[in-house]
Amino acid sequence: MTPVTDAMVLAAGLGTRMRPITDTLPKPLVRVGGRTLLDHALDGLARAGVQRAVVNVHHHADQVEAHLTGRRTPHVAISDERSGLLDSGGGVAKALPLLNGEAFLILNADTFWIDGASSNLKRLMAHWDPARMDALLLVAALTGSVGFDGPGDFSFTPDGKLRRRPERQVAPFVYAGAAVMPRAAFADAPDGPFSLNRLWDSAIAKDRLFGLRLDGLWLHVGTPEAIGEAEQAFTLSAA
């Protein structure tokens, strides 16, 4: 199996729940523990051995591009969405010509966690099996998360597949913002904006959406108030 060498980092969103901070600053450049969320994501990719990252930009795109100018590891390429947001799936589809390999990591730029015994990104890539999977998602237990107050996204089947949370119920796991997907999953992707959820639902219908439980502490930095909670958890972990 060809190893995963590249990653798509989704950094183009408007960060509406982070206002008023994101009125003047893109959410990926919010700092926790002295580093931007985007740098935490790219640092994690570098530690996992990822060689190349494609970062899409839209909201305060000039700031994100300027911030990435000095980045050397991983090598960063820009996918420009200034002309219009493409949502998560459309953003990846547009960036396909910039991505190498038959499969790649997809990472939210505001994804942030504290690893347990080993790199969760390394674990994700090691568990990837294109013969069985159309997508492999990193998911965090609600009980092991900071700053998240939603009802969850998924539950597991006994063989490691994911199922959506039924309406008006609570699910034990939330998408942690990292996945491995094959290039082939985007072969019939629509033009323009669409969500990765569309492809994940298709994978569920074929029994090919799998999950890997995050080892460590997931920090959901979705609002200005959550920054303080994440800072506290980060400080405690470093002590």
Image (spheres, grey):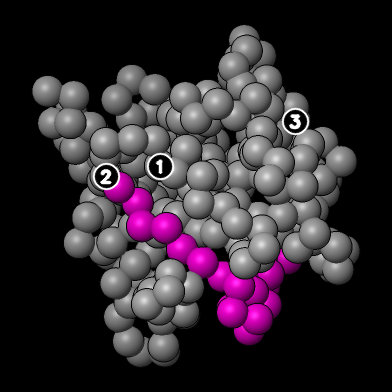
What segment is highlighted magenta in the picture? 194-215
CB of mark 2 within 8 Å of CB of mark 1? Answer: yes
Q: Residue at x 43, y 70 (%)?
A: 160
Residue 184's place in the image compared with 219, above or below, is: below
In depth, the one of 235 and 206 nearer the eye is: 206
Mark 3: few/some/many CA within 10 Å (<14, 14-19, 20+): some
Residue 104 x, y percent position in the rendering = 67, 44
Q: Is residue 231 left or right of residue 92?
A: left
Mark 2: few/some/many CA within 10 Å (<14, 14-19, 20+): some
Q: Amino acid at mark 1?
A: Asn
Q: Residue at x 80, y 59 (%)?
A: 184
- Numbered disc 2: secondary structure: strand
Mark 1: few/some/many CA within 10 Å (<14, 14-19, 20+): many
The dot on residue 22 is none
First of labels 1, 3 by sequence position: 3
Residue 143 x, y percent position in the rendering = 20, 61
In depth, the one of 219 and 20 nearer the eye is: 219
In depth, the one of 1 and 33 nearer the eye is: 1
First of labels 2, 1 by sequence position: 1
The dot on residue 78 is 3
> Which residue was labeled with disc 2?
216
First of labels 3, 2 by sequence position: 3
Residue 157's place in the image compared with 42, above or below, is: below
Residue 192 x, y percent position in the rendering = 83, 61
Q: Is residue 94 visible?
A: yes
Q: Is residue 208 magenta?
A: yes
Q: Is residue 190 magenta?
A: no
Query: In the image, which is nearer the foreground, mark 3 or mark 2?
Result: 2
